[in-house]
Amino acid sequence: MSILQCIRPELQSLRPYQAAEQVDDTIRLNANEAPWTTAGAAYRRPLNRYPEVRPGRLGEVLAGIYGCAPDNLVITRGTSEGIDLLIRIFCRAGEDSIVTTTPTFSMYRHYARVQGARIVEHPAAPEHDFAIDPDGLLACCDDSTRIVFICSPNNPTGNSLARADLQEILERCRNRAAVVVDEAYIEFSSQPSVVDLLERYDNLVVLRTLSKALACAGARCGSVIAAKPVAQVLAAVQAPYALSTPVVECVENALADGGFDNARDWIAGIKTERTHLARRLAEFPFVDRVWPSDANFFLVRADNAGAVMAHCAAHGVLVRSFTNDLADCIRITVGSRDENRRLLEVLADYAESLR
């Protein structure tokens, strides 16, 4: 038995859309495309032609960066589309379920609801820095479980799952459920990616994105890295031409000429600011706790968090609350040095107003 058997039976033999053949330096009269280009469209690939059904060259570049084979990688419109596709291929409406932790990224719940899949949540305790208990998480799984979602580093709490704990979860879910590790913030973490574990566990799926570390959130370019049979079904279900020509070329440009090498300098700067900001935030009298973070943000518990947020907003600084899951908690992104300095000034002004 393999992870393929956990995919919805009616999709296991689904084949991808068969698009018109694309060959460079030919007269293309096979795809009902316009024979003229749009004025001002300065792209390497003309916009009157469809993009590749799946951007092959970009996929090879990303596979090289992430350390996997191109056949294991499906490029998606951000990791959100990857989450949606995974739930659609694994979960039958009204029959199957997902298991995840709480608090965590809300889109796992969102797309499960859209698909009609049951949602089972394992609470992580603030007093234990939101650490995931593998036994507790696995106790939430039953015969209906098709996907276990783990965000590491976790959004919005900033903590990471230990590699040994992940391996225990993968082992005990083998042939039962896919274990999806969302690594949207892995570049900021002290832990390496778990993509290499794919060679040992065919039920592992890893989500990666260019939105954070490469500063390409506006391009909406993510990747799902999975066993080849899973990647093939994902590609069959995903809409053809999912990534537009401008997006593909934008991302290619960002990755060219050592894009990730440049990003390492930015990431190092964020980590330095993260250390400084954590210390300064903890000094404010209205801040009860600053949780340690492995990401580019902090979760902070404050007295009257709503008033803190309102004061920040009134002074042009936006932070985020999670009142549904985390009472009196605020998530604060680590910005540039100037942005962080301004945040601290606004918070100091708020502290002064309490006297």
Image (tube, rainbow, N blue to C red):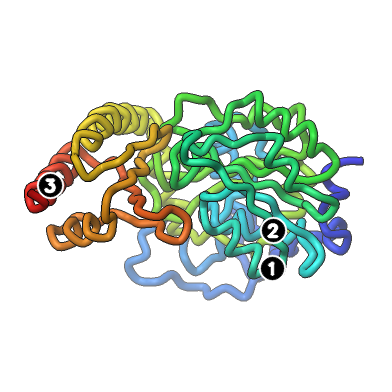
Q: Amino acid at mark 3?
A: Ala
Dot 1 falls on a residue whose secondary structure is helix
Check contact, mark 2 vs mark 3: CB within 8 A: no
Q: Quadrant of residue 241?
A: bottom right
Task: Look at 36% across and 50% down and name the residue there.
Answer: 329
Q: Residue 199, image x and y in percent? A: 74, 28
**Residue that extends furthest to the front in the rendered view of this protein:** 355
Q: Amino acid at mark 1?
A: Gln
Task: Look at 44% across and 42% down and name the residue there.
Answer: 157
Q: Which mark is residue 87?
A: 2
Q: Amino acid at mark 2?
A: Ile
Give whichever of discs 2 and 1 has the lower sequence position: 2
Give whichever of discs 3 and 1 has the lower sequence position: 1
Looking at the image, is mark 3 or mark 1 nearer the viewer?
3
Dot 2 falls on a residue whose secondary structure is helix
Q: Residue 307, image x and y in percent? A: 22, 59
Q: Which residue is mark 3?
A: 351
C-alpha distance separating marks 2 and 1: 7 Å
Q: Which mark is residue 115?
A: 1
Q: Residue 2, image x and y in percent? A: 87, 41
